[in-house]
């Protein structure tokens, strides 16, 4: 019984180390102004394709947006762009939404395309 408990304890304590669980390290790359502008414009273009009424959309300006490197282990080395968007929904009501987009500016897909993922924050 004691041996079994000792073995179970060592497995549970050592499991994160064996699975490679580490704190994310900040990337060694410094975000350039050009990369920040690319990430912002790619994010805006992506959302224009997704919104119900893109012609009514008003995006927060580049200067007012938050643009940083994402250090989360799943989306590491991608630029995170956060901004507000005012746009009409399918019923015609003007809504304000907060979006976070993740753009991989270091690995372009070609033809001016980039890998992008956008999520809307729910309040």
Image (cartoon, rainbow, N blue to C red):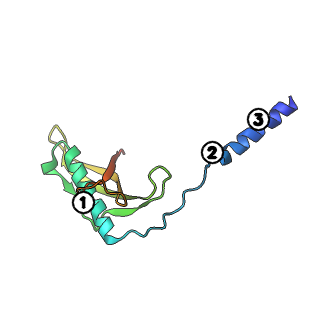
Q: Nearer the viewer, mark 2 or mark 3?
A: 2
Sequence-wise first label, 1 or 3:
3
Residue 48 drawn at (x, y percent): 20, 49
Q: Quadrant of residue 60?
A: bottom left
What's the distance in space between the residues labelled 1 and 3, CA to CA?
A: 52 Å
Sequence-wise first label, 2 or 3:
3
What's the distance in space between the residues labelled 2 and 1, CA to CA?
A: 37 Å
Placement of 20 over or under 35, stated as above or below: above
Q: Which of the two residues, 21 or 63, is positioned nearer the viewer here?
A: 21
Q: Is residue 15 left or right of residue 40?
A: right
CA neighbours of label 2 inside 10 A, class few (<14), some (14 to 19), many (20+): few
Residue ID at (62%, 49%) = 20
CA neighbours of label 3 inside 10 A, class few (<14), some (14 to 19), many (20+): few
What's the distance in space between the residues labelled 2 and 3, CA to CA?
A: 16 Å
CA neighbours of label 1 inside 10 A, class few (<14), some (14 to 19), many (20+): some
Placement of 31 over or under 84, stated as above or below: below
Determine whether label 1 and label 3 are within 8 Å by CB: no
Residue on which the image places disc 1: 41
Describe the element under mark 1 as helix, strand or loop.
helix
Describe the element under mark 3 as helix, strand or loop.
helix
Residue on which the image places disc 3: 8
Q: Is residue 85 left or right of residue 7?
A: left
Farthest residue, direction left: 55
Q: Quadrant of the N terminus?
A: top right
Farthest residue, direction right: 2
Residue 103 drawn at (x, y percent): 34, 55
Residue ID at (67%, 45%) = 18
Residue on which the image places disc 2: 19
Describe the element under mark 2 as helix, strand or loop.
loop
Q: Quadrant of residue 43?
A: bottom left
Q: Quadrant of the C terminus?
A: top left
């Amino acid at each position: 019984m004691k041996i079994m408990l000792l073995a179970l304890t060592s497995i549970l304590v050592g499991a994160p180390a064996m699975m490679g669980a580490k704190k994310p390290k900040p990337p060694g790359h410094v975000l350039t102004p050009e990369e920040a502008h690319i990430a912002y414009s790619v994010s805006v273009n992506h959302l224009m394709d997704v919104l119900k009424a893109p012609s009514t959309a008003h995006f927060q300006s580049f200067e007012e947006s938050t643009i940083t490197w994402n250090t989360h282990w799943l989306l590491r080395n991608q630029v995170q762009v956060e901004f507000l968007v005012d746009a009409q929904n399918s019923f015609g009501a003007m809504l304000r939404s907060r979006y976070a987009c993740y753009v991989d500016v270091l690995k372009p897909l070609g033809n001016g395309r980039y890998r992008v993922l956008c999520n809307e924050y729910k309040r």
